Image: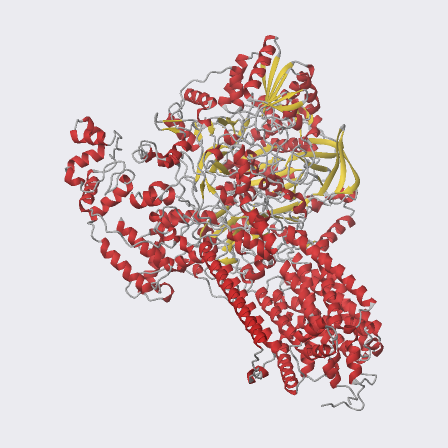
Amino acid sequence: MVKHLTKRNLKVKAIAFSIVSLLNITIFSFNALAQDKLSPAAAEGEKLFKANCVSCHAMDRKVIGPALKDVHTRRSEEWLVKWIRNNEQLRKSGDKDAIAVFNEYNQVAMNNFENLSEDQVKTLVTYFQEYKTPVKGPEGPQDGAGKTSFYSDTTLYILLFLIIILLVVLYILRRTKNSLKASYNEMTGATEEVAPVVVPEWKKRINPTILKMGIGTLILGALVTYGFYFGVTEVAVQQGYAPEQPIKYSHKLHAGDLKIDCKYCHSTVEKSKQASVPSLNTCMNCHKAVQLREKYNDKISPEISKIYAAMDYDADKGTYGSNPKPVRWIRIHNLPDHAFFNHSMHVKGAGVSCQTCHGPIQEMEVVQQYSTLQMGWCINCHRERKIDVENNPYYEKLHERIKADKKNNKSAYSKYFTKDGKISITPAENGALECSKCHY
Amino acid sequence: MIHDSVIRPQLVTGDKTLHDVTNEICRPIENKPSTSWTVGFILSLVFLGILGLTLGITLAYGIGTWGLNKTVQWGWDITNFVFWVGIGHAGTLISAILLLFRQKWRMSINRSAEAMTIFAVMCAAIFPLFHMGRIWVGGYWVLPLPNAFGSLWVNFHSPLLWDVFAITTYFSVSLVFWYLGLIPDIATVRDRAKTEGRKFWYNFFSMGWTGSVRTWNRYEVVSLILAGISTPLVLSVHTIVSMDFATSVVPGWHTTIFPPYFVAGAIFSGFGMVLTLLVIARKVMNYQDYITIGHLEAMCKVVMLTGTMVGLAYITEFFVAAYSGVEYEQYAFVNRAFGPYAWAYWSMMTCNLIAPQVFWFKWARTTPWFIFMLSIVVNVGMWFERFVIIVTSLHREYLPSGWVMYSPTLVEIGIFLGTFGLFFTCFFLFSKFLPVINMAEVKGILKNRE
Amino acid sequence: MAKKQLYWKGEDELLRTKEFLASQKNEFNEALPLDEVFSENNLGLSANRRDFLKFFGFSVAAVSLAACNSTPVRNVVPYLVKPEEITPGNANYYNSTCGVCSAACGITVKTREGRPIKVDGNANSPISGGGLCTTGQASILGLYDTERLDGPMKVSSGSAAKSDWKTIDGEIVNQLNAIQNAGGHIAIVSGTIHSPSSLSVINDFKTKFTNTTHITYDPISYSGILMANRDSFGKQVVPSYNFDKANIVVSFAADFLGTWISPVEFTKAWSARRKVEGADSILKTIIFESNLSLTGTNADLRFPMKSSQEAVYVTSLYNALANLAGQPSIQIAESGALAGDSIKQAAKALWNQKGKSMVISGSNDPKIQTVINGINMLLGNYGTTIDLDNYSNQYKGLDSELSAFAADLKSGKYQGVIFWNSNPVYSSPLSADIQEGLKKAKLSVSFSGTKDETASMCQYIAPDNHYLESWNDSEPKAGLYQLTQPTITPVFMTRQAQESLMSWAGVAVAGIDPFAKKGIYNQNFAAAPYYMYMRSKWAAMGVASDEAFNTALHDGVYKKAPVAATIPAMGIILNSIVSDLQKTIGNKANLDLILYQNVAVKDGSMSNNPWLQETPDPISKVTWDNYVSLPKAYAEKNNIKNGDLVNVSAGSVKLNAMPVFVQPGQANGTIGIAVGYGRDGKVGEKGPFEKIGKNAYPFMKFQNGTYNNVINGVTISKIDGNYELAQTQTHHTIEGRDIVRETTFEKYKKNNKAGNDKATPHLYTLWETKEYKKDGAPNHHWAMAIDLNSCTGCSACVVSCSIENNVPVVGRAEVRRRREMHWMRIDRYFTFENRSNTNYSEDLFLKRDFEGVNVTKETGLEALDAIEAAKGNSEFLHWENVKVVHQPMMCQHCGQAPCETVCPVLATTHSTEGLNQMTYNRCIGTKYCANNCPYKVRRFNWFRYNDNDRFDFHFNNDLGKMVINPDVTVRTRGVMEKCSMCVQNIQAGKTKAKREKRKLNDGEVKTACQRACPAGAIVFGDVNDPNSEVHKLFMNERSYRVLEELNTQTAVKYMVKVRDIDNPTA
């Protein structure tokens, strides 16, 4: 899990600032190595864990359920299997441990996972066994705030202003000095013999009007260039936009520390064009139980109570009222209406990680727009990524054609073969730069 | 460097001395504006107002305020564009080509002709700009600028893009050429200036002209170079304008003879306009001695020649259509001559082919009022030519289901009249603040220069 | 705009609260920053605006910069509890039943975030067979109609006031009881109802209020057929017409492809039998009619008929057949006195196809229909092509009932009246009597959803739900049941009519609500009492379990095994009705008026629907008006031209200042006027409530116990003034150009390339062949094949396209300026046919050389008229005998597109999948592409058509905007647009396939036009896939490209039209 994240972070950097690909490769290969440590079974288990458990469990800390690191030392495998697949039954069967655990976690029943086969649960357990608390990966880019054009500009302006002030002061001082000197001379009657003004040769040759005009032109040109640059890079770019949300939901806490899988809340990201802001009942899944009373001397955490308010949920009675009020989150990533971005295509279809576009979201206390979301930024990615033609039957025809052309070395598609015999074709080469792919 | 023959009539009549020339040409600049000037200027300001109003309406509501429809999507807008660009031709032609050919008679008219060019191109530019549905982006998207769209460039296949380049180049070169010619004269005005303001501005624009031998020398060289540059432009601009149509698949547009035919037409209309203006100018500012009958006559000859060339082109088109054996092509031309817009076609024929033939007679070439009348006819005729080419080709194309009629709205008409307002406003200002005749050069061809 | 919609999920959208509607204002903001900045209501930006005004003054640059750099605050409002079936961003589909007319087509409703946005045919339903007509397509806008009442209304002292259900229920029940106790009578006046549950609701009502009568009344009634079958066979039903079983159909003015009974069903069957591939016969179609109807334009043989003489035609056909059958003939005056030997030919043709033929009549006269029955008996068509046992329920209204009702109402017999889905004050000729009677009635209630003509005369309006908000069942044909399910919670505080009746009759609902335990926010409609009621009825029908019912609900259809068709006995001697027949025969010298339904507007119940009004009439291409269609001969004689105004009068009924359209094909001595116009209500054009066209219903003539649409002896008088009809096509001949290709069936059988054997021109090109066009290209190549032989020109595709792609409605004035925005149009070309020439050969069609005159140029046409005149032949027979072709025309997606090369900014480009892409947000609107398009399919946004009071259609109000398709950009002013081959669906389909790691299947992606087409004339797909349907069609000998010689290499191919006209008698 963690390794994934580190990999992502680096990758984010790589793509966001398009580091030279060489560096890129080395980093990836390093991560690749780092990743190979989990046995396939454990890897399988990790998947299951992320899919089913993360909403209530974390490896290193108590969430709703206990921390599962070293759980295999505390419990036997078959017990775990029983418990996980149907803890209710286990409790009914009068298993002491089971009941103990149940009571320890103020009698919040854990879901039964009979859909998981025994073997699957076993892989889960192997994952628990092989799991090691990770060393913290390199920090994701912290420049979120720094990137925002607004702040940087203001500082710039302030600096400029100061400089101007200083110059003015300088000028005034100089004037006063001169005038003082003059009056002093007057009083003392001292006269300085004025050296004859010598006009240098080059000055004679230059026509003053032309000089003025020349300078004027230069200044004008500079201004225009800056204006143009500003227009291209700044106008309509809301990178770093981080508004305050009605509920101070922290991605750092949930996605980062608790390691809840993004897809648990943004559940439609793989089926729909929208990742979709989760409906509040998703929050309730956990926060029915998690109220953090311990933190707020036995009061419900103010933020969580906002959820309850919205749902009109009475925490004490555990009942829902009849006038809920939807939460009006503030939208951060505003694509123009004529650009149709499809999450499912990118996440499920192309296997792009959330962080690629949204940055180190798991480290953001307040979510901010990480990428420029300018068209050029999209295009750039389409030019760099590779399509996985081997493993997606949709591309079967293309795949075969490439192989065929390679065999009877026709030029048309064989160019998509890299030196090392791998197929490398970018979305761009497969028409992903065409207007109607996103604009219709 | 004066080689005037004994038999040739004088280019400048009335035994002017150098001083006379300066005095007379600077007169309108230094004296109070004449009433005729004031009246004319106010009148053109009114029309300029109309331009502002109608363009404002177009911007506020959309191109829908014009008479265009699903089939005829270019109407008066492009007609007027080509019309004005055409007018814009004579200037450079006169100054550049005639300079290269050392035609001295051009010297007293080239200044105003070039000014006319520049103003005409300005008027022309209005139409391609405002015929765009979204001028606020179109204004710069047609330029190949670096951008944040992952570098989205312009379409170099598109004749419209060629047009952008052609027109801008033509405009800038003509402007420089014109301005260069002005520098010595501005300096003259500067030296005669009395008030501070005049001194400052004329000084500024004369770019510190000293009149030293070196500057004169440079001046001569540069004008020759510029003349060299702009000569091909005279041909290129309208060639490319013609390609706006020639590269399409529209029957009646898709023709290979368009380039020469358009260039001829442009020179034709250009000279027509020059005549119109000069005949007025020489009267209003009594420059009869500088712009002599000789000048007018020379230009009349050009008009007659180009007019006949254009006429030939009209007839050739029909032959080509008939010979091509393409039914759509054939129908397009039959429709031109006998369809619902036949009236436009025939008025074009009369104005452009038949009318100029009267210039075979010396009387016609030498009678200013008649020349004036005919120059107007020529302008009208050339406007109709563009209208015929654009509208009659579009309104009946391949699929009969799409056949429609087109007629302009008040807004379109207003814009067209408005451009005349712009044109004349500029021209009046020019005649008030700048010497309309190139003193420096005219002085060079005076008989008695001592 | 559309996209922003997506984020309005959740409660406040589902139950359209006022705040939500209000808040919409901020949500729909413009694409171009200018407007954002100017708009006052956009608080986020107005501040900026002021600043900039201060600093820079009013300059575009400044303003747009201002707009750009501020982050507009947009909200995301997720569901509180997301219904598990909804995935934001994905569409859900529900099978239901179309509620527009009682033909009851099965439909599939597409919803996004609980909002219906599109209606298409449900392939399971034998009625719609996957297609849907223009009216059905457009009906979805009825749901978002600003004219709908947002709650019950009560008329007190003349003025209608809002009320609430409790109050009016109380008052109405009291009234009903009072009437009941006083022994007064109550009438329920409804359109045809074939919903078993609804009918039993009415019965329950009857049992409560004993002397209640249920009057069924259809504005366009089929009483004639009902009565004829009652008289002939003792079965008062409309039979099922099985076009699929017939080899020849002879129709007397029955427009079965356009408006007659169940057009979608018939079109489906008809077009299936017109498929020529490998067929040894196709359904020969012969029609006798006065107005040029849609069927007329598709018939193989069309004979102009003076409808007032129909009886003569019909009897002489009967007699002709009777001779052949050796049966006694009908003794009727002036029989056989008919132009040409058309009838004889028809008789021969029919006789050759005994038992496999069909004769139908559009007349509503029972006697004529009886003769038709006789003819079909002679031909032994019953039990085969005409089925009385599996009859149709689609129309059950008897005109006699209405006239009786009107009389009784007037006489004060009925003290209580309830109008359900019927608007007689508008659509009945007895309007005056009913209005007078209504004043007398103690209680008058209307279920109308809008304040229509009848409702506004009633004391109470208890608005019914829109059919997309309702539960219902239906039995359009005996043994065929269809279900209607709500696809959205009621937009307004309306209540289903059935529930109103139930509550008034105090009907208790049995059974438990299966939705009861559904989440904390129970969908309001789930527990609907009528739903429970329906369930109990279905349980009685044998569909008790949730599973069984839900399967039916899922399919939308529930069938019982059809009964074996029997051959009935004719229980009437035809000669006994001769005197009645004689009555129907009008004076030949007089002018006939034939009332007809426009294919889009139909009976006018939805005439305030801008989509329908903007859909051009398939024959005249007129929009936004009804008009008098006049035969050329009459127009010439009386020197009337297109757009002149005339007064039409028949007896006491007058229609003043009607515009004239000289209609080729209009039979001499007849004129036509469309009904369904002249409704009250706000439609389209700027300004207050404005009527569209004029109401022609009052002309309907009562005769032989039915209301007849044929009125003999009308008079026309030309008046001063002129009126420009808004036509989308103003040039009507094809100029002999090789645009439409066609042949005859015989020739086709001999040579499949017949009519399509034109040598392909030598094609040269500058460009190299694009990759996707080469053999074995791994990419898709999207393409479309359109079968001119199946296409009837019904225009369903036009509406469907407009809905799918957010095509704006522009209104009459703009259509007059030739600026309609339809991405898809249907080109209609007339051609002339020589009447004197009796051998109907293809050469006559598209014939350039007509009696030595070139008719392809209008000049030639005039010359032709001159010749006719010279012959002293003022009948202009060539105008009466036109032939017609329909050609759907949309962007051809040229492989080498003229539009692409000329765009200076690459706003229109070519994709590697063969699509011609139009990128609105790059377009700067030079319009060169449109000029350079040989097919003239590009449409320019001359104005901003949304949020613009000058275009006050559904794009201008928040309710109407609900119908916007969120997957398609709403175009702003100044950009070009055109058919995209529904690229949004292509992308969705591809994404799905990639996601699911599989190939994209053929037919998985469908265009809107393809989905709509009842005739299946449009096939879309990947031509690079050798197994795809479209690939096969592209290989077909009949396929050709329009303007191929331009080497545009279009991705759309047309299939040669084949007419069965070689031997009319075969």
Q: Is residue C992 left or right of residue C725?
A: left
Residue A412's place in the image compared with C499, above or below, is below
Q: Is residue C124 visible?
A: no
Taking depth in this image into account, of C558 and C224 the one nearest to the observer is C558
Q: Measuring from the top left, give residue A363's x and y in whole percent.
A: 33, 48
Q: Quadrant of residue C532?
A: top left
Name the residue at the front extreme: A188
For the N terminus of chain B, which image quadrant?
bottom right
Question: In terms of depth relative to the viewer, which is nearer, A64 or C290?
Answer: A64
Q: Classify A336 as above or below C509.
A: below
Indicate left or right for A283 with A74 as reference.
Answer: right
Look at the picture and state if C583 lies above or below C293: above
Nearer the observer, C203 or B169:
B169
Q: Is residue A4 above or below residue A407?
A: above
Q: Quadrant of residue C101?
A: top right
State the residue in front, B305 or A293.
A293
Residue B98: percent from the left, percent from the top?
70, 81
Q: Is residue C350 visible?
A: yes
Figure quadrant of the C terminus of chain B: bottom right
Q: Colour scheme of this structure image?
A: secondary structure
For the image, the number of numbered tags is: 0
**Could you say where residue C3 lies in the image, as x and y percent from the top left?**
49, 45
Q: Residue visible at 82% across and 71% down?
A: B284
Q: Is residue C792 left or right of residue C404?
A: left
Q: Position of residue A285 (x, y in %)?
A: 33, 34
